[in-house]
Each structure stands twice: as C-alpha cells, then as structure tokens.
Image (cartoon, grey):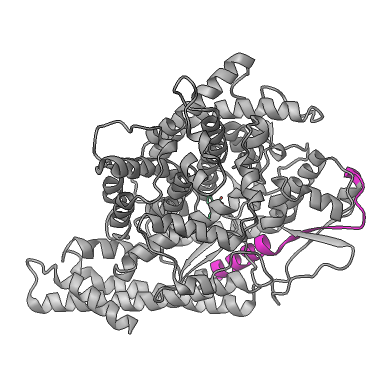
Amino acid sequence: MHAIFAISVFASIALCSLSLGFTNNETDLANQWFNQMNVELKQLNHEAAEQAWESSTLPTQTAIVEKIIKLTVRKAHWERMMCNRGQRYRDFNASFERTLHLLCRSLRHTDDEIRSMTNLLGYLQGIYTGTQVCVKGSCDDDGKLWQSTFFKYPELESGNYVEPTTNEICLFGEPDMERIMTGETMHQFKQAANCMASDEKILDWAWQSWRLAVGPPVKDSYRQLIDVMNVGARRSGYQDIGEAWRAELEMPNLRGIVNRLWLEVKPLYQKLHAVMRNFLKKRHPEVTNFHPAGPIPAHLLGDMWSQNWDTYAASMFPHEVDIESNFRRSNCSAEKMVRRAEDFYSSMGLPMMTETFWRKSIFKRTENVTKCHGTAANMYNAGDFRMIACAGNAMSDFYVILHEMGHIIYYMLASNQPTIFQEGTNSAFQETIGDTIHIAALTPSHLIRLGLLNSSYLKPDSDGNLNHFDYSLLLKIGLTKIPALPFSYLMDSYRWSLFDGSIKFEIEANNYFWYLLENEQGIQSASKTNRENLFDAAAKYHFPDNTPYVRYFLANFLSFQILEGLCKKSIFGDVRTSQELPLPLHRCDLYGSKRAGRLLEKALKLGGSQHWTFVLEILTGSSEISSRPLMNYFAPLIKMLDSIISDLKLPVGW
Ligand code: X8Z
Ligand code: ZN
C-alpha cells in the first residue's frame, strides 16, 4: 500500500519535468529509473534502519555484525549499479542532477573493506557503549578509590554484558559517569561506594577513569579504521576521508568558513572562560595545578567533555529563581518531557508524533538499551519514527528530547519527497532544527507557560532595561551553547589532521589532541599523567561511532540565524524585512506561532531536494552562515561579562 502510494508520488514529480532534448521514450525510461531507484532505496534504508535499531537496543552480537556487512555490501553494489544506469539522465532536469549527485557520492569501497570497516566499527561502538568503570569494596579516600577501580569490557563475541557481582558498583560512560561529572549523582555514588574522597577527587577519578577505560582499547582499531576509510576515499577521488566528510556539507570552502566563524566568536568564548575560571579558582583553592591566567583543569567544568558548563549556572551568579531546580522539582517524567516537546512543535502547526513513535521509542534507560546516546531513527516505513533518550530529570534531558524531536520533525516533513531526498538538505541542518526550538523554548514567557517561572519576571527593571532574570537566563543558555563552539570546532579539525596524515597517529595523536584542547578550548588535563600514549578522543561518543562533528559547530550558528528568521516571520510576516525586532531575540516566543511553523515546514519539506543555501534563504532571507544572530542574541551577556571582567580585573585568555 505504501509502496504504491510512493510510486505514484514519484511518478508525478518526475513526469512534471519533461525535458527538452529527450524523446517521449527516453522520458519514460528516465522516470522508470527514478521511480525504481527510490522504491529500492527505501527498502534498503528500511532494512539498514532496522539493523541499526537492533544493534542499539540489543547487546552487540556477531550475528548482527554479519547481517550489517551483508546489507552494506548489497547497498554499495546497488548504489554503483543505479548510479551507472542513471548517468544517461543527468541532463534530464535539475532534480535528476541532484539525485545523481546524492546517489553517486558514496565511497567506492571493496567488499573486503566494507567487511573490515563494519567489524572495526562494531568493536569500537561496543567498547564505548558496553565498557563499565567499576569499584569494588569500600573506597574510603582518593587512594583507595583508585585501588578498588577496575574496568569491565563487554564480551563482544557473545554480546553479553558482565553483570556486577555483590559489592561492586559498575558504571557505563553514558549516562552514569556523565552524571557524576555534572554532579547529578555525585552524592548517590559516594554513598553507594562508601566514599570519603572529596567531590573534586571524585570528579578527577571519573574524568580519568573513563578515559583510561576506553582510550587504550579504541586506539589501534581507530587507526586501522582511518586506513581503510582513506583507501575508499582515495579510490573515489578524494585526497582522504576528511575531504569526503567535508563534501557532504556542500560548502566548497568549508575550512575557511569554519575558521572565520570560530575567530568571530572566540572573543566571546574567552570572556566566558575568564569568568568561569575565576569562579572555579575560588571554588577549588585546593587544586594546585590551576593557574589564574592559564587553562582550566578539565574535570572541574561540570561535564565529561567540557563542552557544556551549565552545571554551574545557578552557583556562578545566584538568582532568586533557579530554573534548573524548578525543573527538577516539577518531577517531569521522561514521557512528560516528550509531551512538552511535542506540544511546542505542534503549537506551531508542525506534526504530532505518530502512534508508532510512542509505542517504539525509548525514553529511559532500561535493560534493553545498549546505547544511551540520544538518537532519532527514521525507519523508512509509514510513520515509523523513533527516539532513544536515556532521560533523567535535568533540563539537559529536555534538550536531548527537543533535539531528537527536531530530527524526527525533519524526517516527517521530508517524507513526501522521493526517498533520495528524505535525509534533509545536509547534516548541519539536520542538527539545527531541534536546537532552534530548544532556544525558542527557553524564552521567559515559555518558562512561565511551563510553570517554571512566575510572570512577574517578564517586567523590565525600573530603567526599562532587561531585568536580572534575563541575564541569569542568558548566562544559563550561554553556558550550554558557548563552550560547545570551540569543542565542536576542534573535534573535526583534529580528525581532519589525523585523516590527512599531517599528524602522525602513532606518535602524535594524543599530544596533538591536547595541544588543540589547550589552545582553542583553554582546558588542561588535571593529572600529571603522561598522556602521550593514551587516546582521549575515544571518550567522546562521536569518535568510536565515527560520526563527523563539524555539523554541530555549523548547527550552533544556524540555530540562532533560523531563530531570528522565524521570529521575524512571526512578528512581521516576512524574513527579509529590514525592520529591527521589537524585542531582544531571547525573548522572542515562537510557541503557537503558526506563521513561523509554516515557514519551517516550507523549508523542511524540501528535504534534500534543494541545496542548503536555498533552504537557508527561505528561513532567513540570506544564503550565508553568519555569527551575527548568535552574537546579537548574547549581546546582553557579553556586556555583563565585560563589566565583570573589568570590575574584577580578570585576565582573559590563557
Ligand atoms: O550527539 C548529539 C545528539 C545526537 S545527534 C544528542 N549532540 C552532540 C553531542 O552530544 O555532543 C547534540 C549536540 C552535540
Ligand atoms: Zn542530532
């Protein structure tokens, strides 16, 4: 039923575009090729999605890896064959040209390479999701904590996790170790492990032990993976796999754009860094290896990867309203968070989640989740869209849910396109939709709607300026968004250097990683351990998962641009207007704005049928990625940081 429907839609799209220079017979053949390709692609994508879901929800098993290898080989052969057959229709029309561009850009790997890459990836993902850091017996103080620490690795062959025995506490990276780092489960952990060590020692332990657990087993396989990926990339005409990854974004000067954007926002990051450093220095006078004008010890930043500093939002500048505590106190269950997220999207006239979504998604960690990193799945099957979020009760869990739902809304809206266009215009746009709605959901007026804030906080102060709450909110949002900038910038600039060989993997991999972290992020490792032979990048999901990261960097800028566009549309009915918004961007409430929803829908339902510049133009009136809306959004925060820095005479930079 669904396939028949799909065929008729594709046929009408293709037939509308009868092309000059092609006979009727050729036109029929071209349309036949197009329709058949889309139907078969849908089936292949569906099978791949089922396998991916299975491996995220069942322990890694050799049988699944074998099935994945078979399907990946089958899809690679199919793509090549379809691409070759389609070449004769390249000039048929613009849509065919785009179709062939997307279809033919897959890398030309041999079957053996596919086998070896799939095995390596299965192993790497298994290490990340299945490794546990354990403590046995009492851990008393810091020394004992380390003595009683050991690692449990998943039995990758049988797929069985090693169950903890009595007296052992075993923690996965996501979300267990992650939540110790944010402080969320610090108290719980100390009690369970009977730990006397200070919070700072435990943060140091969690930070170090996760890296010691996953880095060494990942390192060699990761190097092998790079080698195989490079062989395929070079056979396909790229210099290396980094160039192939960059091509997906369709920005010819991607490196230049990324460097420019980073330089534009770096001063803002440095200011936030200076104020955070001063705060942490006072909070942790006991940490000796912490210079007041130097990099910040990474384990103090309230996040396993130092990419989100929101943990300290309330204590840095205490305000009578603590949104985070209010949120936690509201006892919002994971499912209720999903309902709230759905409510925001649907208030704008965007689609509600489907019956299958509610039946098949996973919102909390249970035994049948092996992978706990937020995930949105398009199953390529009539309304079957699913989410994985191992949500607790923090606002960061609400973020993950809004983010994943953004992917799903994009999949839903693009699902009327031919299959080849259903992924979205590029990965950065995929990542940005949920982030845009996340910022939109954090306006004071929406927080009031959620029952987290009293309406008196909408009032400007006595001089008609932003009130104190605005600043405290902007700081909270800034602490989640601004540290993500250098982090997402360097995750891929690092990998690009490993991929193109400018950094020698064997001898320089970890030292270069720390060179970047210190220079761009201004953080350092707490311990004096010689890290040269470790592989700390493995501690971040996207490395063993082999997911490119620069998409998140771009998405961060795009989300503020799109927010501004939607806000203009909502208020003036036009994104191109030169009129100034009558309110600061962080107060622009999009909840219930059907105008903004219609604009988003218009852009997203194009899926990948158009180049991203066309989609951005619809949403913002401009086809360039810009840091201006982000800087404009944070302008009041920048003023506040400037005055703190000058009042306290804080050093800036490191
Ligand atoms: O990985 C994700 C999403 C899934 S696409 C949860 N994000 C990045 C991260 O966690 O590091 C979202 C923001 C950045
Ligand atoms: Zn995402």
Residue 52 as seen in the image, left or right of residue 589: right
Residue 197 as seen in the image, left or right of residue 545: right
Q: Looking at the image, which residue is at 39% across and 46% down?
A: 590
Q: Quadrant of the N terminus?
A: bottom left
Total marks drawn?
0
The part of the image, by quadrant, that contains residue 468 is top right
Q: Nearer the viewer, residue 272 or 550?
A: 272
Q: Nearer the viewer, residue 395 or 45?
A: 395
Q: Nearer the viewer, residue 10 or 509?
A: 10
How far from the left and from the top, in percent, is residue 100? 27, 65
Q: Looking at the image, which residue is at 59% across and 49% down?
A: 396
How far from the left and from the top, in percent, is residue 281? 73, 27
Residue 276 as seen in the image, left or right of residue 255: right
Q: Examine the structure image and report whether residue 121 is included in the region drawn in magenta.
A: yes
Q: Looking at the image, which residue is at 46% across and 34% down?
A: 262
In the depicted structure, whether residue 570 falls above or below residue 235: above
Q: Looking at the image, which residue is at 52% across and 34% down?
A: 457
Magenta highlight range = 116-143
The part of the image, by quadrant, that contains residue 29 is bottom left
Outermost residue on the bottom side: it is 1
Q: Is residue 267 visible?
A: no
How far from the left and from the top, in percent, is residue 523? 65, 34
